Image (cartoon, rainbow, N blue to C red):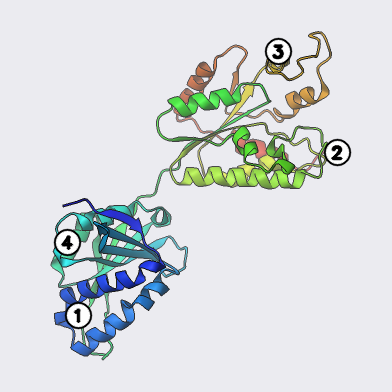
Amino acid sequence: MTAPRIREAGPEDAPALSVLAAVTYARAFGHSFTPSDLTARLATALSPGAFEQAFRTDTILVAEVEDRPVGYVRFGELPPGSDHGDAELRQFYVLPEFQRQGIGGALMEATLAHPRLRRASHLYLDVWERNTDARRFYERFGFVTVGVRPFAVASGAATDPDLWMLRRIPPVAPGRIIVLNGTPRSGKSRIAEVIQATFNGVWMNLGVDRFMAATPERFRPGIGLRPGGERPDLEPIVATLYAALYDSIAAHSRLGLNVVTDIGHHDDYSLPRGILTDAARRLTGLPVLFVGVRCPIDVIMERRRSTGWNADLPADAPIPPPVLRWQTGVHRPGLYDLEVDTSVLTPEECAARIRERSESGEPSTALFRAGQVFSRPPSG
């Protein structure tokens, strides 16, 4: 048999899903209902209108074979619309003639891998206690019976209860976060590239250059705004952009993705913005390695000239004030879990030291300690 295609359904699928559900439900359970109770059940819980309503709160995945819907699963938060860390698998149907062909397993695997369930610590479902095959299927995927749940029919007649089953979802280990803090031309971007290319696992590179490229031109340089308070008009949006960057980093980590970001943090704006403090707050509870990327200013100037910046500046000329402000502002207060010097180490050697420190098991708290320094009121 052709492997099923699993896709996320939408409201336009409601009529087809209703037909699939009605056929499957009637064949599986019709003998246990009176005709009037079965008709009422199909007209209320499994009608096209019921599916249209379900799409407002739930996710439905449909399995197709040669473009024909042959099964579906519906799931969402418990209770609907909540964010309490629990979810419910509300409906799971496969047409009888397509059962025992791997379609149910494919649907369940797609369900358990769905991003929506990554927030859930428990996944519940109910199943008719006499449906032995279904119970065994759910048990294969780690569900255990934890209680019973009443099942009501329109006539009010007595019915067998459903079994209430639970699968505990292992929490996703957060991805590691490496923050490379240094001045422009310090070599931090190249280190980030090496980390992404050589470290084990999935490493997302969410660095300053990529973020600046995504920023509308009228708001640039965005998070690349240099020290000195020269653009107070941009500073509020800069703070917001940093918040968005670190929320994105946190979201990646909480989904199990590793992140490396190269940045040039400072607080030398027209007035203190507390950006590093806010960043630390947004990453609270996540594994963050804060790395200081150092480079002597004479080497910085050589690199600037070789890349077209200050190319016409004589070698013996005074260092431009903006470059000096970068050099002093970025490494204040200078609290790091690790420091590397790119004037004496290659990007590969820097990455190797970062890997060693990251995998050492030593606690990494520098970002949070640095954030506390900037959160204190000035003395005097």
Q: Tag 4: Cα neighbours inside 10 Å, few (<14), some, or many (≥20)?
A: some
- Which mark's residue is nearer the viewer, 4 or 3? 4
C-alpha gap between disc 2 and disc 3: 39 Å
- Which mark's residue is nearer the viewer, 1 or 2? 1
> Looking at the image, is mark 4 or mark 2 earlier in the sequence?
4
> Looking at the image, is mark 1 or mark 3 earlier in the sequence?
1
Quadrant housing residue 337: top right
Label 2 belongs to which residue?
380
Q: Are marks 4 and 3 in contact (CB under 8 Å)?
A: no
Label 4 belongs to which residue?
98
> Looking at the image, is mark 4 or mark 3 earlier in the sequence?
4
Q: Are marks 1 and 4 in contact (CB under 8 Å)?
A: no
Q: Nearer the viewer, residue 340 or 48?
A: 48
C-alpha gap between disc 4 and disc 3: 69 Å
- Which mark's residue is nearer the viewer, 2 or 3? 3
The C terminus lies in quadrant: top right
**Mark number displayed over residue 302:** 3
Label 1 belongs to which residue?
160
Is disc 1 placed on a helix, strand or loop? loop
Q: Tag 3: Cα neighbours inside 10 Å, few (<14), some, or many (≥20)?
A: some
